[in-house]
Amino acid sequence: MIPSAFEYHRPGDLASAIGLLTDHGDEARVIAGGHSLIPMMKLRMAAVGHLVDLQAVAELKGITVEGGRVTIGAMVTQAELIGHEGLARAVPLLREAALQIADPQVRYVGTVGGNVANGDPGNDMPGLMQCLGASFTLVGPGGTREVAARGFYHGLYATERADDEILTRITLPVAAGGYAYEKQKRKIGDYATAAAAVLLTKSGGKVASASIATTNLSDVPVWSEAAAAALVGSDCGAAAVKAAVAAMLGDIDPQKDNRGPIEFKRHVAGVILGRAIARAWARA
Amino acid sequence: MGKKMQVSLTVNGEVHEVLAEPRELLIHTLREKLGITGPHIGCETSHCGACTVDMNGRSVKACTVFVAQADGAEITTIEGLGGPDGLHVLQRMFREHHGLQCGYCTPGMITRAHRLLQENPQPTEEEVRFGMAGNLCRCTGYQNIVKAIMAAAAEMNAKEAAE
């Protein structure tokens, strides 16, 4: 379990980090918490010539909640996210979900930026960020651009981020209303067999707005507009939930793996979405 | 062979300068270069928690940290918990409540429990179970580990109240 050799860099600011990516091209990879990358390197499924450690880049740290907008630095850890009271008031969905990621040791080190940028369908933050309507800031040698979370994921480990860009921060609106992140996993530390994020607002006993996304049920996170549309205007009763589940099942494409066959995953997906909607509605 | 680099680690209050390839895992540096063999290698895949050490005030799995990333870090291992006057209260309580059988997971368990009680000095049983979820034990069934941690918390709080 020893990775192949690499040269280690610890730049002190963002410009130096991008300079290293430009200088070393394909050979370079950034490392945040490393709890996805290091296991891949140990298995020699990822070979890195130049490892660019972002731990000393101050621009990538910190959480701000201001004027209805939330900004999360890419190097904020899951533990820091969980511990931030202002964020928990502004977007309680994030704390609920982060507490279901891996285990305490991994949450101390694993970062929000790494989780969203990695492109592994098992990561929880991508679906959440799609549900929340977040956008990601990418900085590269050509400048800075903003990409919506809903347009960021192209396939397994394939994202909108170019090799010489760094995802520096995540911006999202404060989320009012009911929320839930429901995750089925085989054991602590495992990725989801199926997970769903739900945001709902209520007006006059009806669903006024809804946003629904799933984790690990396709090669990318799935933001299901059809599932949300099935709820809006309804009383969120059994018929509406059934319609939303059916719509979500039309959007996902789970694959058979050691978490189970396709039929099982579709079954679990329906159950967890039903639970997530019920919990979000009770909180709306 | 990769190029070696000079790494500075403060382990249990003592500064060590080591020459290592950046790809070396922190657990190997501790065990093989510094002879600090309390943290164990269990699964080596960041699941079991036997290699847990405290790094800059956070519980981390030393099998999933490159030594290069730890350059400049303050690290505490099980060896740093007991004082010159004997065992740490967590160690005493693990012994008293039979919180171990084979003992392989115990250094990681106690090092993690120590950080948990620093952050949450009066945890509920549920909080202890949630906070210890990154450490696996294949012998005890966890019941007595939880009891030992609850007892240690009670003694630490009683001592603090008396002071």
Image (cartoon, coloured by chain):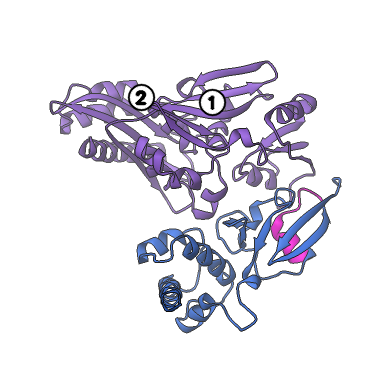
Chain colours: A purple, B blue
Tag 1: amino acid: Gly
Query: Quick one: A23 or A69, which is closer to the camera?
Result: A69
Q: Quadrant of the C terminus of chain A?
A: top left
- Does B146 sit left or right of A280 as displayed? right
Do the residues indicated by labels 2 and 1 lie within the same chain of the protein? yes
Residue A48 appears in the figure: no
- Check residue B31 for magenta coloring: yes
Q: Secondary structure at mark 1?
A: strand
- Does B4 sit left or right of B133 as displayed? right
Tally of marks: 2
Residue corresponding to mark 1: A155
Report crowding for label 1: few under 14, some 14 to 19, many 20 or more residues within 10 A (C-alpha). Answer: some
Chain for numbered disc 2: A
Position in image of residue A12 (x %, y %): 72, 36
Which residue sits at x=39%, y=33%? A214
Tag 2: amino acid: Ser
Q: Earlier in the sequence, mark 2 or mark 1?
A: 1
Report crowding for label 2: few under 14, some 14 to 19, many 20 or more residues within 10 A (C-alpha). Answer: many
Q: Which residues are magenta?
A: B21-32
Query: Quick one: B149 or A157, which is closer to the camera?
Result: B149
Inter-mark Cα distance, 2 to 1 = 16 Å
- Does A65 sit left or right of B16 as displayed? left
- Check residue B3 for magenta coloring: no
Position in image of residue A17 (x %, y %): 71, 31
Q: Quadrant of residue A137?
A: top right
Residue A116, above or below A101: above
Residue corresponding to mark 2: A224
Chain for numbered disc 1: A
Q: Secondary structure at mark 2?
A: loop
Position in image of residue B157 (x %, y %): 42, 73
